[in-house]
Image (cartoon, rainbow, N blue to C red):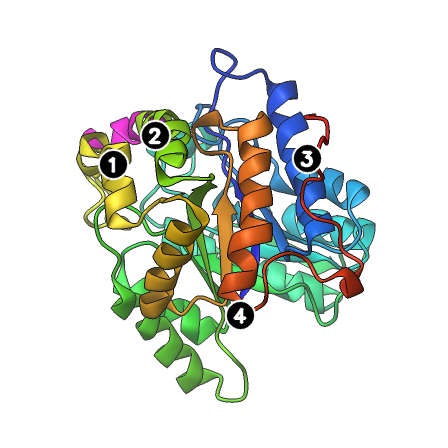
C-alpha cells in the first residue's frame, strides 16, 4: 500500500490567513517527501471556504515540486469543465517538466452549483463536456497536430508545449462518488479511481464495479484505487479526539454550507444530488469517527481502522487529509510524524521506525521548529 497527503483547504481569511495555510501545507509536503510518502494531492474549487484557497492545484504542485525531490504530485482534482483542453494540457505538461516527470492528473466532474453558475457552464450536459475535455487532454498530451470538433470546443493542428516528460503521458485518475455508471465508465476508460468515503456508509460494491469494468476492457493492465480520508494520530485516543473533533466539526460546517445551493438545484446530470446537504449538516465529528469517514486515534486505533477500511476497499493508495477544518501547525505535523513512525510501518508489515539503510529522515526530528 502506498501513502500520501491529500489537501482540500476549507478555511477563509476569518479562520486562517492564506499565507499561514500555505506555509503549513508546504511544510507538510516537504516532510512527506523526506519521510518516503508517495503523493501530495490538491483539489480545485472556487469562491467559498470549501476549497476556495486553491483555484489552481497545478500552481500549488509546482511550488511543491520546487521544494521536494521525489514525491509524486497529484491533482485531486482539477475540474476540466471549467477549462479549455489546450490550456489544461499545456499547464499539466509544464508542471510535469518542472517536476521532472512527477505529475499525476486527477479529474473530477465538479458538483457545486455556484461554480457552474459563475463560469456560465450548464450543469445539464456537464457529463458529456467533462468526458470530451478529458479525452482531448489525453490526445493533446500523447499526440501532435491534434484536431478536435465538439459542441463544447474546437481547435485545429494543436501541439501543446512543452511536451510531457512522462511517456506516453502522466497517469490519469478520475473521481467518483455514488453513481454506479460513473464507476463502470472510469473502468472502461482505463484510468485510476479516486474515492473519498463520506457520510455514514461506504459501498465497496461500487469500487468492485470499477475493477470489473477495468479488467474487462483492459485485461493487460491493473486497476488502481486511491482513497482520501481525514486522519489524525496522537498518543492516545482521547488526545486525538480532543484535537480532531473541533476541526472535523468545522470541516462539516464548511462542506454543508458549500452544498446549500443543492436545496433548490435540480440537474439531469446529477441524479439524487438535490438535498444532499441534509445528510452532511446532520453529521457530527463523532459520526465521522464511528462510521469511518474520518480516522482518529492512537496509532493502534488508526491501524485497526485503516485495516477495516482496507478489508472493504483494497485501496492501492491511502491519502491522508491532514488539513481538515483548517488544521495545521504543530498538531498536523505531530500527527504526520506519528503516522510515519508508528502506523505506516505496521500497515506495511515492517518494524516501527524508519530503516536507517534507506537514507530517509523521520517526518519530524525531536525539537524541529514549527513552520
Depth-wise, is mark 3 or mark 4 nearer the camera? 4
| Residue 193 in which image quadrant | bottom left
Residues under numbered marks 3 and 4 in contact, where contact means CB atoms less than 8 Å apart:
no
Mark closest to the chain's N terminus, 3 or 4: 3
Q: Which mark is residue 26?
A: 3
Label 1 neighbour load within 10 Å: few <14, some 14-19, many 20+: some
Label 4 neighbour load within 10 Å: few <14, some 14-19, many 20+: few
Kind of element beneath mark 3: helix
- Residue 201 image point, x, y percent: 22, 53
Distance between the Cα atoms at labels 1 and 2?
7 Å
Q: Which mark is residue 349?
A: 4
Q: Which residue is mark 1?
A: 286
Q: Quadrant of the C terminus?
A: top right
Residue 353 to residue 257: above or below: below
Q: Point out the stretch of residues depicted in magenta.
A: 254-264
Residues under numbered marks 1 and 2 in contact, where contact means CB atoms less than 8 Å apart:
yes
Amino acid at each position: 500500500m502506498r501513502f500520501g497527503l491529500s489537501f482540500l483547504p476549507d478555511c477563509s481569511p476569518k479562520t486562517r490567513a492564506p499565507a499561514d495555510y500555505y506555509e503549513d501545507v508546504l511544510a507538510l509536503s516537504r516532510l512527506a517527501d523526506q519521510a518516503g510518502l508517495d503523493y501530495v494531492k490538491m483539489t480545485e474549487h472556487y469562491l467559498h471556504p470549501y476549497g476556495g484557497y486553491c483555484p489552481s492545484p497545478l500552481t500549488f504542485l509546482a511550488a511543491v515540486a520546487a521544494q521536494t525531490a521525489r514525491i509524486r504530485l497529484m491533482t485531486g482534482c482539477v475540474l476540466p469543465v471549467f477549462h479549455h483542453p489546450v490550456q489544461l494540457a499545456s499547464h499539466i505538461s509544464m508542471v510535469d517538466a518542472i517536476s521532472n516527470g512527477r505529475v499525476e492528473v486527477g479529474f473530477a466532474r465538479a458538483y457545486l452549483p455556484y461554480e457552474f453558475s459563475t463560469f456560465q457552464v450548464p450543469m445539464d450536459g456537464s457529463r458529456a463536456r467533462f468526458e470530451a475535455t478529458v479525452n482531448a487532454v489525453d490526445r493533446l498530451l500523447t499526440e501532435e497536430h491534434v484536431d478536435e470538433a465538439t459542441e463544447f470546443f474546437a481547435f485545429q493542428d494543436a501541439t501543446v508545449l512543452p511536451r510531457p516528460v512522462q511517456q506516453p503521458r502522466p497517469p490519469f485518475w478520475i473521481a467518483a462518488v455514488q453513481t454506479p455508471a460513473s464507476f463502470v465508465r472510469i473502468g472502461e476508460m482505463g484510468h485510476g479511481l479516486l474515492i473519498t468515503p463520506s457520510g455514514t456508509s461506504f459501498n465497496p460494491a461500487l469500487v468492485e464495479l470499477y475493477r470489473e469494468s477495468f479488467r474487462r476492457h483492459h485485461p493487460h493492465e491493473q486497476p488502481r484505487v486511491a482513497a482520501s480520508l481525514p486522519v489524525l494520530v496522537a498518543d492516545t485516543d482521547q488526545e486525538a479526539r480532543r484535537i480532531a473533533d473541533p476541526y472535523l466539526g468545522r470541516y462539516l460546517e464548511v462542506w454543508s454550507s458549500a452544498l446549500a445551493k443543492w436545496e433548490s438545484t435540480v440537474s439531469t446530470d446529477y441524479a439524487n444530488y438535490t438535498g444532499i446537504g441534509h445528510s452532511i449538516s446532520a453529521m457530527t465529528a463523532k459520526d465521522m469517527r464511528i462510521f469511518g469517514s474520518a480516522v482518529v486515534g492512537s496509532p493502534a486505533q488508526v491501524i485497526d481502522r485503516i485495516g477495516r477500511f482496507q478489508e472493504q476497499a483494497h485501496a492501492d493508495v491511502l491519502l491522508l487529509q491532514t488539513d481538515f477544518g483548517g488544521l495545521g501547525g504543530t498538531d498536523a505535523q505531530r500527527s504526520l510524524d506519528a503516522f510515519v513512525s508508528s502506523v505506516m510501518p505496521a500497515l506495511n508489515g515492517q518494524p516501527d521506525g524508519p530503516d536507517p539503510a534507506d537514507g530517509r529522515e523521520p517526518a519530524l526530528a525531536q525539537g524541529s521548529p514549527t513552520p
